[in-house]
Amino acid sequence: CLYPSGGDPFMPEPDLVDIGDGCVVDNASIVAHLNTRGNFELVRIRVDNNVTLRVRSRIQQGVHCESGSMLLEKSLALTGEVMEVNSVWQGAPASRVFTYDKKFLDLPTGGSFDDSDLTESKSETIPFFPLTKDYSSEDEINMYIYV
């Protein structure tokens, strides 16, 4: 697990949190308890491989972040929420914003893209283009997003 802003996420119950490989927790809160009207509950949180929790995001008890999911800045995943594979979530409460197109996630590192690789996205799916070379200036970067 990578902690870009330092290794200090708010995680009061680390023994109830399962974090997979390749995850990024950027100053996020991972809280496995809930105290509602005197009813105190502890429920395990599952964070699968390659999940990203952005700055000041928060996941509550019972949340399952499936592989490749991302919770954007200042967003809240409520109790028992399942964040689907390769999806991006935002808001308080969080809702799915879009899902990455699987065919672009499976491309080998160092692959190349051209305009013929682009297809218009359907049903809240957008293509994901990993950077495959070291760009020397911002004007060389082309990003294609269909919404």
Image: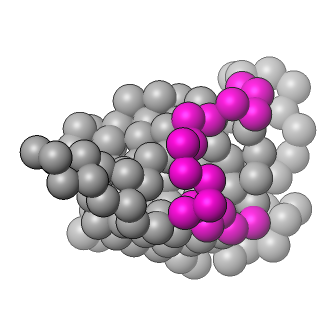
Q: How many badges with numbers are in the image?
A: 0
Rendered location of residue 25, percent (x, y)? 63, 43
Residue 101 horizontal side relative to residue 137, left or right: left
In reply to whether residue 16 is colored magenta, the answer given is: yes
- Residue 142: x, y in percent? 62, 39
Q: Position of residue 58 (x, y in %)?
A: 41, 41
Magenta region:
4-21
Position of 135 relative to 68 (above/below): above
Please give the name of the residue rendered at 38% of the width and 30% of the height, measured from the top-left corner. 74
Residue closest to the eye, 110 or 75 = 75
Q: Residue at x 52, y 68 (%)?
A: 46
Q: Judge by depth and name the residue closer to the eye, 121 or 23.
A: 23
In the picture provided, is 25 more to the left or to the right than 69?
Answer: right
**Relative to residue 73, is residue 78 depicted above or below?**
below
Magenta highlight: main SS:
loop
Q: Residue at x 57, y 78 (%)?
A: 103
| Residue lying at 68% horizontally and 77% vertically, measured from the top left | 106
Residue extending farthest front: 38
54 in relation to 64, above or below: above
User: Is residue 135 shown to the viewer in this render?
Assistant: yes
- Determine the image quadrant of residue 73: top left
Q: Is residue 101 visible?
A: no
Q: Does the stretch in magenta take in 2?
A: no
Residue 15 is drawn in which quadrant? bottom right
